[in-house]
Amino acid sequence: MQVPAVSFEFFPPRNLDQSFKLWETAQALAPLGPDFVSVTYGAGGTTRQLTHEAVTALGSHCGLNVAAHLTCVEATRAETMQIVDDYAAAGVQEIVALRGDAPQGETAFRPHPDGFASSVELIEAIARRGDFTIRCGAYPEPHPDSPGTHADVAWLKRKVEAGASSAITQFFFDADTFFRFRDACAAAGVDAPVIPGILPIQGWAGAKRFAARCGTSVPQWAEDAFTAAGPAGERTLARDLAVDLCRRLIEGGADRLHFYTLNRPELTAQVCAALGVAAPARAVA
């Protein structure tokens, strides 16, 4: 089995304890040689400064290639591009450009009157600078605001044409879900890599809440499996399911995997080890 390239997503800390946890997570996963790590951006720009601090710290102190998330929510074009300028000055070379979710308490995204109306506009503006690798999001199952997968594929094509060099998918439970989306993208002429997003399940109840927010369908077999496993067997089941999903993706042609770590590295590290992702193996390769 081919050993995949990997990348990891972190979220910025909001307090001292979380800062230590982020540092521990980065230190645990950095030896696996990720292509990049990304740092999320809170709804409504609530972690704007925290994201910037985490991005610069991970890049300067851990030697990681850090991709900073950036959204269109509750900011003018000038404010958003100032953040881009600040990242450039800090030596950041990658941005994950997203529309962003509605601010807390609101049910729908509304662009700032002087802001970017969509991820496509944001990507175009960053691309005009010419000094960033731009990644974007993709939905293998319909985005909550989308009429269907055909619209998501068409929108992804627009993002790639605007300047995105790759796309990272939302998480999913079945490999076939990713394969159908990947094949639909290829048929539509999307020529950028589509990287499957993997969520090692840290807790079943939390994973279901996450799925409900982002439009990921929860298959009955997964519900039945976690019910049967119970709290005592949940972690072992989560590891085995993630390993099986990743292996199926690799066998189906995926050569890159992006892990949503939730700043908890142990399960992600175990999955990577089972896939043969390790520093010594990469050094020999």
Image (cartoon, rainbow, N blue to C red):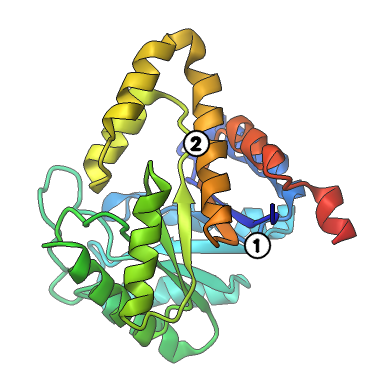
| Residue 126, disc | none
- Mark 1 lies on a secondary structure that is loop
Q: Nearer the viewer, residue 251 or 238?
A: 251
Residue 249 shows in this picture: yes
Q: What percent of the width, then of the height, locates residue 65?
A: 65, 63
Which quadrant: the C terminus? bottom right
User: For residue 265, which quarter of the picture?
Assistant: top right
- Mark 2 lies on a secondary structure that is loop
Q: What percent of the width, then of the height, locates residue 73?
A: 25, 62
Seen at 18% across and 70% down, the residue is 151
Seen at 35% across and 50% down, the residue is 42
Tally of numbered tags: 2
Residue 53 shows in this picture: no
Name the amino acid type tagged 2. Pro
In the rendered image, which residue does mark 1 sit on? 35
User: For residue 225, which quarter of the picture?
Assistant: top left
In the rendered image, which residue does mark 2 sit on? 200
